[in-house]
């Protein structure tokens, strides 16, 4: 596969006279793809049933004739004002019961049936017009589901749909009462119509009520996406995709991905570091011009799996963004580094957001590949450099990694509902394991919790997985590599209760979690001859095989060398040391890296990335400042 570059373009933001030059400049800069149309509804259909496609026809023809492949989009993330006037109750409602207003974007509730029809209707009209247009080589559905906290809605429509969802799942109210154990606090219902949404309760709602609401909300996203994909497939043969976001976990991306052909995501390394990372200030200062060295790759690996091997970066940060608490400039070379890293992880296309900075509206302070006056911004020359460098490669292909890490959206929801300690988040737990593996130079596959074939892996990690489903259980029983689980793995039933014989319910692990405790920041439980546990600690009893103890005498790791259960949230050094031993046993070669250097292997090359403004040396390898080094393997 030969990776390509692209950009996001908004013909409706610029005068028509500029389009031809923009298209030619894109081609001359080495871009092959352009994404358009995802926010253009008010220009396509300014009033209900009044269509204005001529401008878009011309834009498509100019861009396509210049040699660009077009990603056409459905515009359903930005319903125009008249749609809201038509369906005033389509607005998403927050947990405090307030409708979130129009005037920006993503203001719709996934459960509103009128809006769903409206979204299908406009998608169908656009698909009919352009479905067989030869310049259009892919479609994007909507834009960033769930972004701006828009998956969960506490509207009347959501309530109605949630009642239907519970009826379908539990069939009788007795069964729901039994599964939810509503006897607790006299919460039993006589009828599905009595069920409310789990907001505005005096104290915590029943955790299974909240978890089911999250499951339902995820299903609504799946349904919304599916209804668009079904309509598009009637008119087009080209691949369908969606642009997911970073660290948005409110819906099951694996399930949404099943109705699409390619996964894509929007990679804003500096925005994410400022906006959605709990790292310390000193870490953020250190990486303020590169972003967290593991964050982008985590999502590359996750979305490669969501796309079943096929994935893109649809929006790559090209310069400072506007939306994080602080918006620094990328280091010189960082845009090139991010692009190469995505390519090394298998991106088919890296497309920059956006071609030209808009001098108006919400994102006027967000850089583009070009300045608002049309002069090239630094990101563009770095993109063009990648374009030239790519000529060295016939093809860049992925190989299966030896290490697989499970990521489970349902566990995210379960532990949001029941964190037990303020600092327990599933994403961060899995991410800590990922970071420790990456710091050993490993390439990692992130896989879903219902993986059925583990045969080519040597190590499987499933930290914090709330429940091991039947499929995974069978796959684990067949697996002859090393399994690492805990903490919190196999600790709940699907009904969000404690398993009757107590956790962990993990095949092959003998032991019982007698108690758990969560720890204040900086409180640590030392592990003998190792580092420490933080945030979360389990007291394990009845285990006949303790591999390691804590200083206080409690088991730290139980199991055997092929199946380990870790009793708490271990620090990075401890995780690294556990993984180092396992890799030695499994004959997986590792390279100890400092926190600025990362490696990714493809089928033919080893790529080294340096997230620092100074040259880094690892053994005999020198990785230039803010740079990339590759070698054939
Ligand atoms: C993304 C979004 C784009 C643009 C960009 C700015 O989340 O899809 O439309 O807003 O952020 O960084």
Image (cartoon, rainbow, N blue to C red):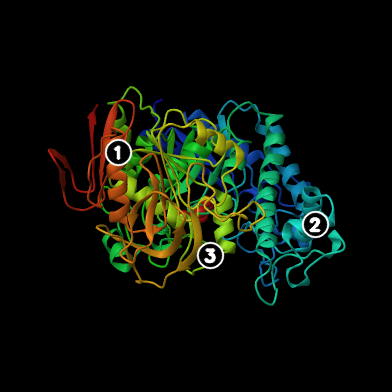
Q: Mark 3–mark 1 contact, CB under 8 Å?
A: no
Q: Which residue position holds label 1? A: 583
Q: Kindly tell me whether mark 3's CB lies below 8 Å from ligand 1.
A: no
* Mark-to-mark CA distance, 3 and 1: 31 Å
Image x and y of residue 344, in percent: 35, 35
Image x and y of residue 178, in percent: 77, 58
Disc 3 versus disc 1: nearer the observer: 1
Question: Looking at the image, which is closer to me, 6 or 621?
Answer: 621
Q: Which residue position holds label 2? A: 163
Image check: 112 left or right of 78?
A: right
Q: Which residue position holds label 3? A: 419
> Around disc 1, counting alpha carbons within 10 Å, would you say few (fewer than 14), some (14 to 19), or many (20 or more)?
many
Q: Is residue 265 visible?
A: yes
Question: Looking at the image, which is closer to me, 229 or 502?
Answer: 502
Q: Is residue 330 visible?
A: no
Question: Looking at the image, which is closer to me, 337 or 399?
Answer: 399
Image check: 102 left or right of 254?
A: right
SS of the residue under disc 1: helix
Image x and y of residue 552, in percent: 33, 67
Question: Looking at the image, which is closer to me, 301 or 552?
Answer: 552
Q: Please name the residue shown 56% across and 34% down the image.
A: 474
Disc 2 versus disc 3: nearer the observer: 3
Q: Kindly tell me whether mark 1's CB lies below 8 Å from ligand 1.
A: no
């Amino acid at each position: 596969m030969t990776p390509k570059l692209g950009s996001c373009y908004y013909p409706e933001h610029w005068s028509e006279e500029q389009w031809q030059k923009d298209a030619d400049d894109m081609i001359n800069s080495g871009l092959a793809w352009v994404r358009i149309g995802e926010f253009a509804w008010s220009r396509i259909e300014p009033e209900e049933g009044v269509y204005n496609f001529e401008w878009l026809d011309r834009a498509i023809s100019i861009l396509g004739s210049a040699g660009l492949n077009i990603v056409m989009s459905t515009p359903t993330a930005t319903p125009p004002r008249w749609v809201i006037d038509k369906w005033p109750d389509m607005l998403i409602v927050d947990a405090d019961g307030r409708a979130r207003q129009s005037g920006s974007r993503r203001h719709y509730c996934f459960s509103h049936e009128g809006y769903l029809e409206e979204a299908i209707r406009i998608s169908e009209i656009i698909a009919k017009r352009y479905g067989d247009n030869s310049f259009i080589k892919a479609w994007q559905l909507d834009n960033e589901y769930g972004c701006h906290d828009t998956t969960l809605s506490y509207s009347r429509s959501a309530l109605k749909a949630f009642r239907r969802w519970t009826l379908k799942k539990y069939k009788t109210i007795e069964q729901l009462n039994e599964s939810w154990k509503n006897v607790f606090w006299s919460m039993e219902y006589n009828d599905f119509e009595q069920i409310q949404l789990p907001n505005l309760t005096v104290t915590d709602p029943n955790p299974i009520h909240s978890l089911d609401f999250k499951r339902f909300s995820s299903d609504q996203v799946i349904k919304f996406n599916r209804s668009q994909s079904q309509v598009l497939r009637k008119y087009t043969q080209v691949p369908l995709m969606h642009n997911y976001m970073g660290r948005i976990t409110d819906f099951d991306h694996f399930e949404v991905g099943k109705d699409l052909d390619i996964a894509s995501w929007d990679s804003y390394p500096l925005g994410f570091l400022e906006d959605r990372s709990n790292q310390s200030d000193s870490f953020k200062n250190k990486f303020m011009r590169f972003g967290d060295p593991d964050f982008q790759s985590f999502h590359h690996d996750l979305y490669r799996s969501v796309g079943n091997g096929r994935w893109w970066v649809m929006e790559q940060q090209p310069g400072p963004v506007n939306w994080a608490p602080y918006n620094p400039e990328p280091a010189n070379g960082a845009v090139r580094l991010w692009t190469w890293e995505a390519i090394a992880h298998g991106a088919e296309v890296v497309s920059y957001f956006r071609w030209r900075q808009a001098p108006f509206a919400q994102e006027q302070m967000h850089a583009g590949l070009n300045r608002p006056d049309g002069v090239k911004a630094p990101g563009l020359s770095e993109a063009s450099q990648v374009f030239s460098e790519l000529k060295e490669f016939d093809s860049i292909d992925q190989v299966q990694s030896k290490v697989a890490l499970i990521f489970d959206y349902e566990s995210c929801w379960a532990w949001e509902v029941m964190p037990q300690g303020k600092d327990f988040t599933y994403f961060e737990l899995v991410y800590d394991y990922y970071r420790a593996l990456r710091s050993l130079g490993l390439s990692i596959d992130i896989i879903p919790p219902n993986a059925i074939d583990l045969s080519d892996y040597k190590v499987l990690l499933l930290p914090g997985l709330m429940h091991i489903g039947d499929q995974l259980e069978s796959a684990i029983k067949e697996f002859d590599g090393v399994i690492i689980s805990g903490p919190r793995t196999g600790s709940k039933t699907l009904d969000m209760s404690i398993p009757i014989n107590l956790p962990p319910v993990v095949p092959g692990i003998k032991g019982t979690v007698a108690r758990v405790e969560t720890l204040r920041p900086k409180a640590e439980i030392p592990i003998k001859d190792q580092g420490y546990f933080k945030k979360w600690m389990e007291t394990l009893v009845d285990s006949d095989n303790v591999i390691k103890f804590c200083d206080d005498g409690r088991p730290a790791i139980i199991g055997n060398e092929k199946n380990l259960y870790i009793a708490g949230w271990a620090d990075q050094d401890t995780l690294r040391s556990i993984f180092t031993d396992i890799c030695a046993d499994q004959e997986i070669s590792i390279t100890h890296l400092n926190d600025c250097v990362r490696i990714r292997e493809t089928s033919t090359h080893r790529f080294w990335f340096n997230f620092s403004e100074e040259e880094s040396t690892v053994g005999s390898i020198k990785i230039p400042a803010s740079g990339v080094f590759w070698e054939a393997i």
